[in-house]
Amino acid sequence: MTAKAWWPRIHSKLIRVWRFRLRNLMFLLPRPHIQVVVEDDSQFNFAFFEWIARHHPGLYRHLRFSLSGSLGAMRLPGARVLLPWVRDPVKERSLELFSQLLALEHDFKTAGLAVVNPVANLSRARKSVALAMAQSLGIRCASFQPCGPQSDFDHLVRQLGLPFIVRDNATHTRPMYRIEHPMDLNTLPWHRLREPVACEYLDTQQGGRFRKFRCMTVDGVSLPRHLVVSGNWCTHTKDRLFDPAYLDEERRYLALPGCPFHGPLNQLRNLMGLDWVAFDFSVDKHGELVLWEPNPFPHLWDYRHPLDERLSHHHPAIHRIFNQMMLHLVQRAGWSLDRRGLHTHSGSAQTGETASEALNNEIQQRRH
């Protein structure tokens, strides 16, 4: 095996040992910290925290990472906040993981400490649950019906109209299928769906194009993340059309001070009992909100892979969102940021820029 082949494995193991073992030795003393519990050491889980490490190293030194199910996943003296940084939903995927995190959350709450995005509430992000909540608030979204290999096509058509969509109720990455004929339902690969549901097809296309917006709602603030324009009804970032007019449209959306539909989306976030949630939505021809789904554990940015240069206008949006998430963690910990840096109210301050200064400086650098 060549060095090129084995080095990534060695590097990954070294990072794991450092992040979850050696680095955590400093928290054996009562050092004020935020405990972040992850399911695995995939780098996908750490984009937000790597951003903090780069821009706010003083705060990063007060983040303690632990793997769920390990001996390290326990509350230590000095803990101020618990963040279960795990994929939603948990209970429906793994009762063992759910029980472990629920016990840890109970320990924090009993001690009067904060929990961000409680694990039990992540189940409210399941499509059928979240969208029923949305409908109770008057938000337009698709109606759902349970379905499976034995489902009657005519019954689903009477309930949902035609065409309708079959997708997974719990996960965000499994495929969606547009059903127009009985044969579509009969030949559907059901094994690819963990918890299949049939949902109403809402046509939001305008001029032959589909638009899917994303915003991040963090404790009363909703910030635009992206707008994808596509010719595909099932719109993902990989389907993005790079026409200059569509990119300009996205730039206008990202330049907004906040999401135009902050009011109802923030109401829904509150009803779900979550601190932060990403929402995917469209706008119909009347300018009304059409909500597709919430995502408490969204893919906001992968720092390992530079953005396509045509999407450089995403950088300020990413930084605004990460900045808001960071400030929320600081606030829940009862800490503060000022010109001298982070204050944990333990008699010390970590020198460095304030959150707003770092964000503004980064945006200026990107512009130049």
Image (cartoon, grey):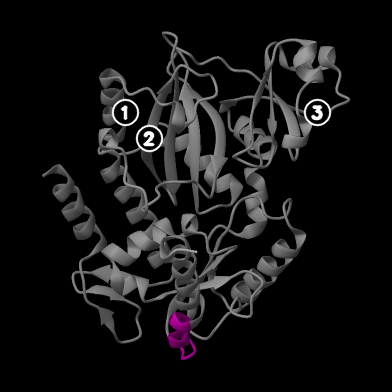
Name the residue tied to disc 3. 147
The extreme bottom residue here reads 29
Q: Which residues are magenta?
A: 22-30
Q: How many marks?
A: 3
Tell me which residue sits at (41%, 72%) in the image: 334
Percent of width and height locating residue 27:
46, 85
Magenta run includes residue 185? no
Magenta run includes residue 28? yes
The extreme left residue here reads 368
Quarter holding the C terminus? Answer: top left
Name the residue tied to disc 1. 250
Q: Check disc 3 and give the amino acid type.
A: Cys
Q: Nearer the viewer, residue 42 or 335?
A: 42
Asked whether the residues under the numbered discs 1 and 2 touch, taking CB atoms below 8 Å apart as contact, a structural biologist would say: yes
Tell me: residue 146, above or below residue 185. below
Q: Check disc 1 and give the amino acid type.
A: Glu
Percent of width and height locating residue 170:
68, 42
Tell me: residue 209, above or below residue 147. above
Name the residue tied to disc 2. 226
User: Which of the two discs, 1 and 2, labels the residue nearer the N terminus?
Assistant: 2
Percent of width and height locating residue 15:
45, 71
Query: From the viewer's perspective, is 19 left or right of 368?
Result: right
